[in-house]
Image (spheres, grey):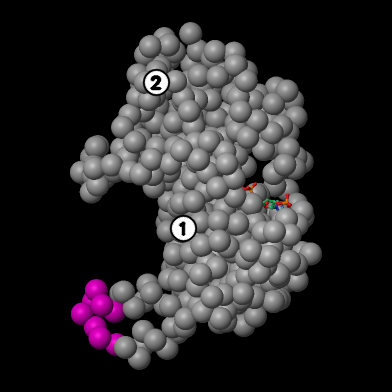
Amino acid sequence: MATVLCVLYPDPIDGYPPRYVRDAIPVITHYADGQTAPTPKEPLGFKPGELVGCVSGALGLHQYMEASGHRFIVTSDKDGPDSEFEKWLPEADVVISQPFWPAYLSAERIAKAKKLKLALTAGIGSDHVDLAAAARANIVVAEVTGSNSIGVAEHVVMSTLALVRNFLPSHRFAEQGGWNIADCVSRSYDIEGMHFGTVGAGRIGLAVLRRLKPFGLTLHYTQRHRLGADVERELDLIYHPDAASLASAVDIVNLQIPLYPSTENLFDAAMLARMRRGAYLINTARAQLVDRDAVVDAVTSGHLAGYAGDVWFPEPAPANHPWRTMPFNGMTPHVSGTSLSGQARYAAGTLEILQCFFDGKPIRPEYLIVDNGTLAGTGAKSYEMK
Ligand code: NDP
């Protein structure tokens, strides 16, 4: 019997389950790069479209855990030495956590987790795990690559339109009984004809470029390896050798790269100063890619016209986090990758990874971040270790 310690966000304040507004979600079998969506063995343990990312939803795993005889602990109490997470960590063979409510697996915590063999991210982005410490402790780190990429891309497109068109302040005027057209439109533009650049054109970044193409923008990107000439031609892409070159060439910058030591603080005060006056910055990748206070200064001074995204540090963000109240922000809690649609796939992927792990079968390489004491699979392509 193994102990599986699962950290999920709390239930809705009005109770669980919520009243669903739709009866079903579309079935997605493949992603844009040809990868198949998760294929766990039945039973799935939940109905796709159900809220499974919270504690009562338990990723739909109760049935599997009961049938397999594993001890299954599900909690949202993840921070501090007296948390349920720290209490159970020394017993845990498997830790499941999500980027939206991350159980930070620091080197200190990994040192306490003597039995831990698998750190599984129900979602994408395993930077809440100290990958070097996990590798030293021979812990497998895996995530459900591809599961929520399109949801995040849609959130970036929405944020782009919301910021540039000044949607949120205009909505507030309407809600509050106003009809202040001049106030609404004094900061409102069309995105048509603007220059948009993404730092990172991987699964999400490229999906953003594809979705924005019909809006009539000029599209730019940077990453270490150039995309194929066919893709560059298809989207009329302008390639930049680095983020600094892209930052000064576009009206809207999107960050879509993983967080690892050399990408931390990439958008510091100097990089923000390179951006055009009135440019917009969108970040659904990771908060520590930018200097928190330099962003506040840039938006407050008017150098940037707006900042949007859904990633914060730490998470959940403290009530006094300055991005909650800074002007012209389009921030949400960390939700882009955990729509009911995304949950169905990352919960199924979590089950698939657990089945492989407990049955002694190989985990798909695209799901692996760390294996056999080193970066592996997607991890070897996407991350660097300290
Ligand atoms: P991918 O690995 O598919 O793409 C990342 C891209 O970033 C790669 O194409 C890579 O290209 C590029 N890149 C990596 N390092 C650098 C660098 N130093 N400079 C420039 N480019 C770089 O990842 P995804 O698109 O799936 O996800 C991107 C990130 O989005 C994740 O790491 C995660 O942090 C975040 N995310 C957020 C979610 C949310 O809910 N908000 C959900 C899912 C993911 P190359 O190697 O050629 O440089």
Magenta span: 173-180
Q: In the shown orientation, is residue 291 left or right of residue 160?
A: right
Q: Magenta stretch mostly in which secondary structure?
A: loop
Q: Quadrant of the C terminus?
A: top right
Quickly name the residue at label 1.
154
Mark drawn on residue 42: 2
Q: Position of residue 254 (x, y in %)?
A: 59, 64
Mark 1 lies on a secondary structure that is helix
Instruction: Give me the residue at 38% from left, 25% from top.
Output: 44
- On the question of residue 370 being in view, the answer is yes
Q: Residues within 10 Å of mark 1 (few under 14, many from 20)?
A: some
Q: In the shown orientation, is residue 306 left or right of residue 289?
A: left
- Amino acid type, mark 2: Glu
In the rendered structure, which disc, 1 or 2, sits on the residue that comes first in sequence? 2
Viewer-nearest of discs 1 and 2: 2
Determine whether 344 is above or below 289 in the image. Answer: above
